[in-house]
Image (cartoon, rainbow, N blue to C red):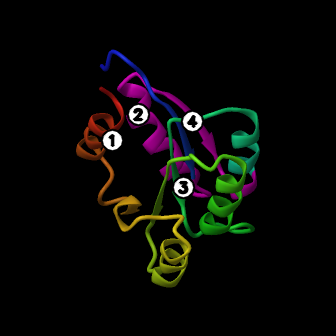
């Protein structure tokens, strides 16, 4: 358990994947909100601040990249890690080309997610 907790938003239309990632962070003592669509994520950002967010790229309706662009307009300092289980290089490259995403902010799910990932995030964002 960590001394300081992070406020985290997890966004994924796959409810099992979203809930599983949220549970990993909650077990470490972090405050986690889950959104199951890009629109819900945008709404969450209009209502509160997050230390970090994890957003699926491929979602019905507004995809993760479109949602990310809108979130960055609302909160330019938002830290959003994009993740996907699909091959979506063109969408990722679009975000990188527009300066809204660094290649280090991109993760593949679910194989890279787990305790090591949680620990890596904690080391990056907690003193």
Quadrant occupied by the C terminus: top left
The local secondary structure at tag 3 comes to strand
* Front residue of this view, candidates 47 and 31: 47
Furthest residue toward left: 116
N-terminal-most mark, 1 or 3: 3
Residue to which mark 1 is pinned: 121
Q: Are marks 2 and 1 in contact (CB under 8 Å)?
A: yes
N-terminal-most mark, 4 or 2: 2
Residue 11 is at least partly visible in this image = yes
Quadrant occupied by the N terminus: top left
Where residue 50 is drawn, which disc sits there? 4
With respect to residue 12, does 98 lie above or below?
below
The local secondary structure at tag 1 comes to helix
N-terminal-most mark, 3 or 4: 4
With respect to residue 37, does 124 lie above or below?
above
N-terminal-most mark, 2 or 1: 2
Residue to which mark 2 is pinned: 25
Residue at horizontal 60 percent and vertical 41 percent from the top: 34
């Amino acid at each position: 358990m960590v001394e300081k907790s992070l406020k985290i938003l997890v966004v994924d239309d796959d409810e099992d994947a979203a809930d599983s990632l949220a549970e990993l962070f909650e077990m470490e003592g972090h405050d986690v909100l889950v959104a199951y669509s890009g629109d819900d994520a945008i709404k969450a950002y209009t209502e509160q601040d997050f230390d970090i967010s994890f957003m699926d790229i491929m979602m019905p309706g507004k995809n993760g990249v479109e949602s990310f662009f809108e979130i960055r307009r609302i909160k330019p300092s938002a830290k959003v890690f994009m993740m996907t289980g699909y091959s979506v290089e063109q969408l990722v490259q679009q975000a990188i080309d527009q300066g809204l995403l660094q290649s280090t902010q991109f993760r593949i799910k679910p194989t890279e997610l787990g305790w090591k990932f949680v620990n890596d995030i904690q080391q990056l964002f907690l003193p």
